[in-house]
Image (spheres, rainbow, N blue to C red):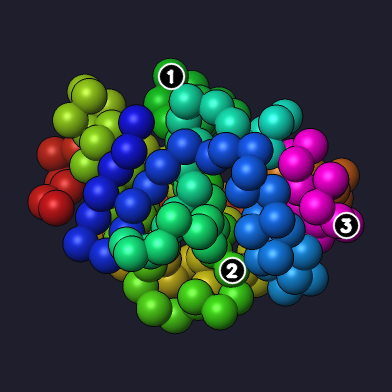
Amino acid sequence: MRIETERLVLRPWREEDAAALYQYASDPQVGPAAGWAPHRDVPDSLNILRSVLMDDHTWAITIKGSDEPVGSIGISPGRQEAERGEYEIGYWIGRPFWGQGYVPEAVRALMSLYFSFGAGRIWCAHAEGNDKSRRVIEKCGFTYRFTAPWTAPIGEVRTALYYAAEAEDFDD
């Protein structure tokens, strides 16, 4: 499924995206903020495409006019007890695209889609200190709910702040 916004196309990941994925996901300022290690090489990115990103609920973020992925967004069942039976959105974008409003645009598009599917509440979280992610969450209308320990994919236990948005309050 493709999702289009004013400036973006969210599309399924493909194996041929490995080099573009590596270009942005190898940046040491991108992955560690989200709890995952920078990609080591293109074969590492290909493996991550196959094992993580190529699923029905994860999209490559592309800028209209270019099919090159510059980030990723996905939605999955919530992992914390308070999120049971509900969805959580996760995202990242390459550093050259920070501060341009692309991630909030992608998050709002995904929220709109899942609320239209009948989701009553959607969650989003960020690791303590990840202010860029916090600003995205706040711009998208999420409200702080609780703080809890989170084990990042790299194995570190971090403090995460969880936010929720209600379908009845969403006006996109």
The foreground one among 42 and 102 is: 42
Q: Position of residue 3 (x, y in %)?
A: 29, 43
Q: Position of residue 40 (x, y in %)?
A: 88, 57
- Name the residue beneath numbered marker 1: 85
The residue that appears at 33% across and 52% down in the rendered structure is: 9
The residue that appears at 55% across and 27% down in the rendered structure is: 55
- Distance of label 2 from label 3 (alpha carbons): 16 Å
Q: Magenta span covers which residues? A: 34-48
Q: Which-is-in-front pick, marks 3 and 1?
A: 3
Q: Position of residue 11 (x, y in %)?
A: 41, 42
Residue 151 in view in this figure = no
- Name the residue beneath numbered marker 3: 40
Residue 86 in view in this figure = yes
Local SS, label 1: loop
The foreground one among 139 and 41 is: 41
**Numbered tag placed on residue 45 in the rendering:** none
Q: Earlier in the sequence, mark 3 or mark 1?
A: 3
- Distance of label 2 from label 1 (alpha carbons): 31 Å
Position of residue 171 in the picture relative to residue 13 (left or right) = left
Badge 3 amino acid: Arg
- Name the residue beneath numbered marker 2: 94
- Distance of label 3 from label 1 (alpha carbons): 35 Å
Badge 2 amino acid: Gly
Which corner quadrant holds the N terminus? top left
In this picture, is 96 found above or below 127? Answer: below
Local SS, label 3: loop
Q: Quadrant of residue 8?
A: bottom left
Q: Residues within 10 Å of mark 2 (few under 14, many from 20)?
A: many
Q: Earlier in the sequence, mark 2 or mark 1?
A: 1
In this picture, is 32 found above or below 87? Answer: below
Local SS, label 2: loop
